[in-house]
Amino acid sequence: MTELKLPELGEGIESGTVINIMVQVGDTVKAEQSLLEVETDKVVVEVPSDAEGVVTEILVNTGDQVTQGTPIIRLNTGQAVQIETSESKIEAVEINLETSVQNKELDLDVEKAVLSIPKTSEIKLPSLGEGIEKGTIIAIHVNEGESIAAEQTLMEVETDKVVVEVPADFGGEILSILVKIGDEVGEGTPIIKISSNSISDESQTIVEENIGMKIQAGKTINAENLNVKESPDRIFIGARKGQFRASPLAKKIAREIGIDISMMPLREGTNRISVKDVKNYAKSINQSRTTESATMAMASLPDLSKWGSIRSEAMTGIMQATSKNMSTSWSNIPHAWLQEKVDITYLEQMRQAHKGAFKAKGSALTITGILVKVVAKALEDFPIFNASIDSQNAAIVYKDYINVGVAVDSDRGLMVPVLRHANEKSITDISYELGSLADKVKNKKISAEELGGATFTISNLGGIGTSAIFPLVSFPQVAILGVAGSQKEAVFIDGQFQPRLIMPLTIGFDHRVINGADAARFLKRIQHLLEDWFMWTL
């Protein structure tokens, strides 16, 4: 008997209401078949079955308020191996073979399996963020012999983008610190050895392997020798040549991250797939894709020393990341640019008149802040500039959110903090948030979350005084606005030349999805919004 529970409904969604039950008692359901619909404050979610079997009991009713983990349906699966886990420990390991065949060799002594796990555990460096492979330890906040609590900050790691605080996975006493300040570390690097009764991911895998070996020690279970209906979704995966085993947890994780577990290669000497195997396989696929889609091979540097003395300095992490990202953009995006000159004479007069009020509130009214608001409004009118291209599926992905990234020059290199939902914010809010993000970049306190998710980018070099700019689009975005230095120019108005403050703009765009005419109209829309504030209300 298997009890199905409500899975996670989505990031930030805690509960929902059952609005439709799509099965009845006695129905035979397959894995991934929709069981019911749950309405949240954001979306309606179809809840699939984790297993295959006959519905014996429906534990919820239409109108019930449910949360993640709520039992919803009981299934008679015939054969089940269920491993329930939590983030910090294995709550139960239950093996229930509902069959007339008795096989004493398959009895699992769960208590012995758990007690056999070593009490000394290693805490390993977690993922530092999407696309971040390594970092440098810049601070260690604990000492050997110290008792720590779960989620307590252990150390700080500086990456090419942010400084990341590394928390403890569980509490215990620190036996030894395996790294030191200045060490370069990557995901999975052991950093601390701790004495604890909590069970880590690695120990959880040991339990899975222990169970797998005990099952394998008995005679192989299959439909032929048990004389019962085969249950491939619970014990065997039969879509590949040769039998193998996978725990329900491993199958669940594989399904959630889009891995076809039936196509996974097996480790030598075993026919069992564990959670760790799924994670390692997914990681290898991502690394392979990154390698395959990497930029063109770089030419070898010739011997420059024969022409004179030279010196070599290592690139900083941010310099390496910028080099990689720009190479990716240049090799994947066919760029095109259009330029326009904007008369910001009146805009600058208004900015000077009101900047004191903004300063009194703790923020600054800048041209960049105004540009963020203007661009966000223009993106509402031209959604193609807020989109991404899905080349593999020949589709254009339109985003219902507008997140504007602003390129910021720092002593560590170029960084792009993101103002989320910029179209829903006032200039006052944008100005304050922009100042806060800039301070975080300066003080190395910016988080990876605050650097991700941009749908459009603004690069403003006006403060340096450049006369033109041709920025590169940041993949997977499709456009970027470049801003050069404003200058006084003579403009012929009403029969005479008048001095006007002119700001050059450049729109760089992906020519696969944006044509020149649309780029011109988008740039003209920005020009009109900057030159006539009344347009903002239309």
Image (cartoon, grey):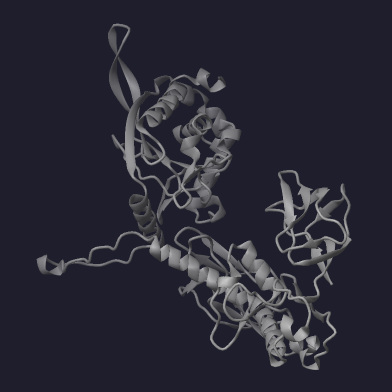
Q: Quadrant of residue 471?
A: top left
Can residue 139 be seen here? The reply is no
Image coordinates of residue 366 in percent, x first then y, are 47, 33
Quarter of the picture holding the C terminus: top right
Quarter of the picture holding the N terminus: bottom right
User: Total label count?
Assistant: 0
Q: Is residue 439 above or below residue 237?
A: above
Image coordinates of residue 521 in percent, x first then y, are 41, 26
Q: Nearer the viewer, residue 285 or 350?
A: 285
Residue that extends furthest to the top in the rendered view of this protein = 495
Residue that extends furthest to the left in the rendered view of this protein = 307
Residue depicted at 52% across the width and 60% down the height = 130
Q: Is residue 93 left or right of residue 524?
A: right
Q: Is residue 490 above or below residue 360?
A: above
Q: Quadrant of residue 203?
A: bottom right
Image coordinates of residue 390 in percent, x first then y, are 47, 48
Image coordinates of residue 36 in percent, x first then y, are 79, 53
Q: Nearer the viewer, residue 394 or 195?
A: 394
Can residue 427 be seen here? The reply is yes
Q: Nearer the viewer, residue 495 or 233?
A: 233
Q: Is residue 360 left or right of residue 76?
A: left
Q: Is residue 299 left or right of residue 433?
A: left
Q: Is residue 23 above or below residue 124?
A: above
Residue depicted at 82% across the width and 55% down the height = 23
Q: Nearer the viewer, residue 177 or 371?
A: 371
